[in-house]
Amino acid sequence: EAGVVQSPRYKIIEKKQPVAFWCNPISGHNTLYWYRQNLGQGPELLIRYENEEAVDDSQLPKDRFSAERLKGVDSTLKIQPAELGDSAVYLCASSRNSGGYIYNEQFFGPGTRLTVL
Amino acid sequence: AQTVTQSQPEMSVQEAETVTLSCTYDTSESDYYLFWYKQPPSRQMILVIRQEAYKQQNATENRFSVNFQKAAKSFSLKISDSQLGDAAMYFCAYKWNAGNMLTFGGGTRLMVKP
């Protein structure tokens, strides 16, 4: 079974430029997560999708960040315009959530390391 | 809000020895999961071990075991017979039973000396 795929692995941009990250979750996983991991810290959730619906985006800076998950599969996270403080690793994860109180493991991709100059 | 604290930014262990990584958390919930994730330089987070809060027995996965103290809200990871491949960042994480969100600690960098 293929894991969570993310691209690109690295991205270097000038501040004020736009940037986009792509994530392909594990086949059959209905829940998709985007996390941001600042240097030396643990990941923090930006947004969670259940199928096509964004159900938890309270930590997403909506003035410059946007995300979409068309057809409930692949997802794209965009930043426009990027700021120096956006430099971080952006991790995507997916899980197969069947509802209720059943444990559903999150599988992580390798992340995209963004550097804003 | 739930918080997870890892008080050891770095730990070092000799190959084949045992090391314990510490984690404390704060929650008002009674049903939750706790996890330890490993993040090697490749950046991919890998689940090492998980513990359900309702289980009194400590979880064990081969060389990895936890010491779960629910009343003290403590969740430490013990790595026995440390190997060079164990060198990585280790993150403690919490998830409320009825939710999907993982809350991570700040991480502990483990170095393994040959």
Image (cartoon, coloured by chain):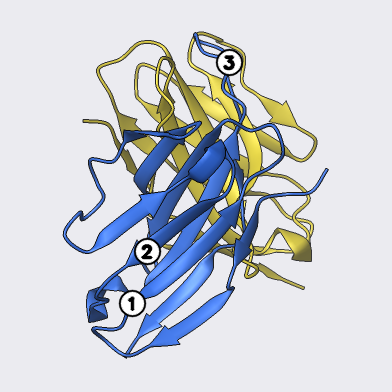
Chain colours: A blue, B yellow
Q: Where is mark 2, residue-wise?
A: A78
Q: Are the residues flagged by discs 1 and 3 in contact, CB closer than 8 Å?
A: no
- Indicate which disc residue A18 carries: 1
Q: Where is mark 3, residue-wise?
A: A98
First in sequence: mark 3 vs mark 2: 2
Evaluate whether label 2 is on the same chain as label 1: yes
Residue B5 appears in view: yes
Write the residue at 54% across / 61% down: A22
Write the residue at 72% across / 38% down: A27
Residue A15 figure quarter:
bottom left
Write the residue at 24% across / 46% down: A59
Q: Determine the CA span between mark 1 and mark 3.
A: 36 Å
Q: Determine the CA span between mark 2 and mark 1.
A: 7 Å
Q: Is residue A83 left or right of A52 when viewed as pictured?
A: left
Chain under callout 3:
A
Amino acid carrying label 3: it is Ser
First in sequence: mark 1 vs mark 3: 1
